[in-house]
Image (spheres, coloured by chain):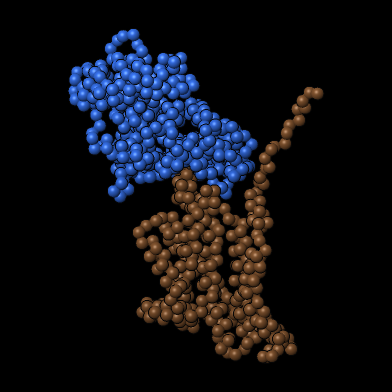
Amino acid sequence: MTATATPLPPAQPRRTATGRGRHLRDDTGRSWTARVVVTVVIAGILLPLVPLLLSSFARGYFHPQVVPETWSLRAWQIALGPGAATWSALVASVVVAGVVSLISLALGLPAGRALGLYRFRGRRVVEFLLLAPVLVPPIAIAIGLHGVFLRLGLTGSVTAVVLVHLVPVLPYVVLILAGAFANLDPAFEDQARSLGAGRLAVLWTVTLPSIAPGLVTAALFGFLVSWGQYALTLVIGGGRVVTLPILIFASASGGDTAVTSALALFATLPALAILLINAHAVRDRAAPLGGVR
Amino acid sequence: MTAITLTSLTKRYGTITAVDDVDLTLPDGEITALLGPSGCGKTTTLKLIGGLLTPTAGTVAFDGIDQRDVRAEHRGAVMVFQDHLLFPYLSVGDNVAFGLRMRGVGARQRRRQAEEMLARVGLPDTADRHPDELSGGQRQRVALARALVVEPRVLLLDEPLASLDPHLRDGMRELILDIQREEQVTTVVVTHDQEEAAVLADRVAIMFDGRIAQVGTARELHDRPADAEVARFLGSPNLLPGVRSGRIVETAAGALEVPHGTAQDGPVLVTIRPEAIVVAPASGPNILAGRVRDARDLGARVQVTVAVGDTQLTLVTRPDALRALLPGSDVRIRLPADALWAMPAPDPAAELAFRQDVVEGVAPVDAGTRTQGAADADR
């Protein structure tokens, strides 16, 4: 018999073109213990919201009752009705948290780059000092800064609230970005420059895509940390800047549990949304340049 | 078409001088190799030419025009790094087209030029693949294509073959030579491997400690090293200290007529390539009597170590001479006067430092056996 000339199929299995195969492999490798842990954590976050949900739809909800006896939409109508203070508080919260997030990114990018990429004398000290605002109780910071802001004539303005929110927000943003930059090989930036990319083009085509997952996390984290501030906003805003937390506390001290519950749930929604977006972004866009090494 | 002139080029980091007062001319359209051990400043020099680093002092000029104020992205001197550095979030085609995109070339035109260039480096139909799907050798070709597609004035190659498996190096070397011959682009290759330098480059500049020790063709460096350091780096095994008086150098192995090299009377170092030493000549000048210490059959040739008194000389000869060169047998060897080369005697302090470097494995004794790790450390 003569040998047939049928070409052999390629010996090596072809890799998938999208590169998503990696994630699939991770999923199959995930053990059931990890699944249990994740489930418990998510339950721990979501379960406390259940009594809030029940309370917000209750007409009277008293101690021995597991579930309210009578239901009502009253609280939600008050909380979200047209002309309710909620809407202006929402705008204030979104503006403050958004601006804080953007400013912290602008300041955090160079700082995170320095901490993530370069070794220098005193780096450990800087890292520790960065955490200081997180370690000190916010009320202490608030009272201390209140004096300073009074002298500067800044108290009671949105600007002042934005500035004071940067105190607890910046440490998180800088540290998250430092972690993202640790994955970037600066040689890629040199390569881009060599190929004709100017400063902005390097930032846009190399640096930002490389740290994208960390950047998204830092932006969302900055937003959320600002979103949840109460003491700093109250003291520095002097009651004139009313964000959602301020409104919730005011409502709580007013004694209407159902409305307070509704407001609290409403304020949680963006946080939950961001949590989901973040988890999605970090999983699917994890393509830092460092990953190739 | 660009000739490069480096004038008093210096780069210091704090107290460390990485590039030390380098003067060098790189002729238009030629390939020049910067050869030296890791940490000698050759990659720093490459980055200074490309504008990726700013010199502490001195100038880089292209065609006589100082590039001091010309930023890297406008120099047209494109660097290809040792580990390809393909952007992992771009397809192969988009990687190749990157430089064109930066120059404002339209999408369709970019795509066409990228595909053409990929075909030229032997990778047609890979534009839609992801860099992860290519082998190391293919990625290096893509990196070369990405540099060439912008038609650079100057091509800067940092250890282009070092990250490749030995069986891939020949192909890449041929590719670089072919393309360079066609494009006539002025090319600078950084390498720690003298064979690579010899095969790729028209001229070789050898660097130690940030300084250029010698510039010439590979043959000139090989036969006429400027000093003991160059000779040692190029793997010359025969270095005989001696004292010159006129044409004669008195060495421990005997008096030798050395017409070439350092002419000044006094201490010198004499070298000769192993293949230039002649075995058992009938008669003539520069004949030494010795004893065979060792003879190794290397297949195509035989490497023989001969002891002349306390001096050991290494020579290479044809395999059919092996029978006459059994260890212990007496042998007469001639060191042809034209093949001998006198160099200035190294100063004793430098000599001691060099020996210590060898002991600690810092300075290479034989460039050909150096490892990949040392090359990486150079970056």
Could you tell me which residue is drawn at 33 percent across and 28 percent down? B231
Image position, residue A274 (x, y; %): 60, 67
Compare residues B200 and B151 and report the one nearer the observer: B200
Identity of the residue furthest to the top in this view:
B282
Vertical arrangement, residue B23 with respect to residue A166, above or below: above
In the displayed structure image, the side of residue A213 where residue B40 appears, left or right = left
Vertical arrangement, residue A197 with respect to residue A217, above or below: above
In the displayed structure image, the side of residue B228 where residue B72 appears, left or right = right
Looking at the image, can residue A51 be seen?
A: yes
Q: How many numbered marks does the figure carry?
A: 0
Compare residues B301 and B320 and report the one nearer the observer: B320
Image position, residue B307 (x, y; %): 33, 22
Which image quadrant is residue B190 in? Answer: top left
Could you tell me which residue is drawn at 58 percent across and 76 percent down? A90
The colour chain A appears in is: brown
Compare residues B233 and B111 and report the one nearer the observer: B233
Which image quadrant is residue B234 in? Answer: top left
Name the quadrant of the N terminus of chain A: top right
Which image quadrant is residue B334 in? Answer: top left
Identity of the residue furthest to the front in this view:
B328
Image position, residue B245 (x, y; %): 19, 20
Image position, residue B52 (x, y; %): 40, 44
Looking at the image, can residue B188 be seen?
A: no
Compare residues B303 and B181 and report the one nearer the observer: B303
Could you tell me which residue is drawn at 30 percent across and 25 percent down? B311
Could you tell me which residue is drawn at 55 percent across and 79 percent down? A245
In the displayed structure image, the side of residue A241 where residue A20 appears, left or right = right
Identify the chain drawn in blue: B
In the displayed structure image, the side of residue B307 where residue A186 appears, left or right = right
